[in-house]
Amino acid sequence: MDPILIILVLVAIFVIVFAAAGIRIVQQSQTMIIERLGKYHRTLTSGFNIIIPIFDRPRQIIWRYTREDFDGRNVVTFKTRDKVDLRETVYDFPRQNVITKDNVGTEINALLYFQVMDPVKAIYEIENLPNAIEKLTQTTLRNVIGEMDLDDTLSSRDTINSKLRIILDDATNKWGVKVNRVELQDINPPRDIRDAMEKQMRAERDRRAKILEAEGLKKAQILEAEGFKESEINRAEGEKRAAILSAEGEAEARIKVAKAEAEAINKIKEAVASAGDPIQYIVAIKYIETLDNMVKGEDTKTVYMPYEATGVLSSIGGIKELLTAK
């Protein structure tokens, strides 16, 4: 074989390999830091990029990965890669023991959502970014929980999340990282503390139930008394109106009776005016009605005649004369 041909083939292969080594394809939401002769040169964007092999090489970054083993437990591994992921990343930190202000040991695990905003700072400002974020989160969580009582820790998750996010975002800003959210997954006090809290909660619920029952009974008694009061007022008002109406009715009845008697007297007067004295007739009628009422009783044995019986008899005779004349 001709040596010149061999040299040309080798040169062609070298050119192809050299060109292939200089091609870098970066995916969307990723970037690559290129160093030339060990110094930062430029940042590759997503898409097709060309670098000079041998002189240019990507700077690798350590990244954190979480996977499940055969027992279902999360295993954390750290790997180096030459591309920086610009998407929001979530880190699930393992449980850690923290001590509250009232000296109660508690297990807490947290979730951290962050995003790399400046890949140059993320590579050159910190050696191991995931490990630094994890340690910073753990120490900050201990400091925040150490300033709060256990009751406040259990009831103020939003406050803890806000404090952690502000502190971590300020601390990681020089690393080119923005912390978006921090979430506390579980807060597990010791077993004896949980039992005491359950007893306290049960006692508090019993106390509230008794208070509500007493308040309900009190309101029921008040409503019953008010109802009785209103019923008595209504009854008294009804009796008052009934008495007024009865009195008015009796007065009207007496007026009508008096009017009727007056009309009867007038008619009698008109009837007997031509035959005799009408006064004598009325007096005789009254005497007869009185005698009739006196002898109606069952135990009546004696009949008493008025002293002026002769006057009565004369009145009866006058009535006879009037009727005869009529």
Image (cartoon, rainbow, N blue to C red):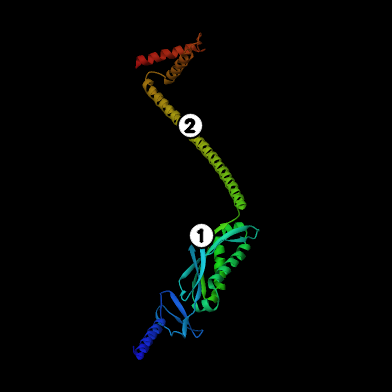
Q: In the drawing, does residue 163 fall left or right of residue 35?
A: right
Q: Label 1, secondary structure: give it.
A: loop
Q: Is residue 139 visible?
A: yes
Q: Is residue 71 above or below residue 175?
A: above
Q: Position of residue 140 (x, y in %)?
A: 59, 67
**Outermost residue to the front:** 1
- Amino acid on which disc 2 is placed: Ala
Q: Which residue is found at the position 54% from the left and 71% from the top?
A: 169
Q: Is residue 181 visible?
A: no
Q: Position of residue 164 (x, y in %)?
A: 56, 67
Q: Name the residue tied to disc 2.
A: 247
Label 1 – label 2 distance at C-alpha: 96 Å
Q: Position of residue 295 (x, y in %)?
A: 47, 12
Q: Nearer the viewer, residue 250 or 27?
A: 27
Q: Name the residue tied to disc 1.
A: 73
Q: Position of residue 203 (x, y in %)?
A: 60, 47
Q: Which mark is residue 252?
A: none
Quadrant of residue 101 within the rendered picture: bottom right
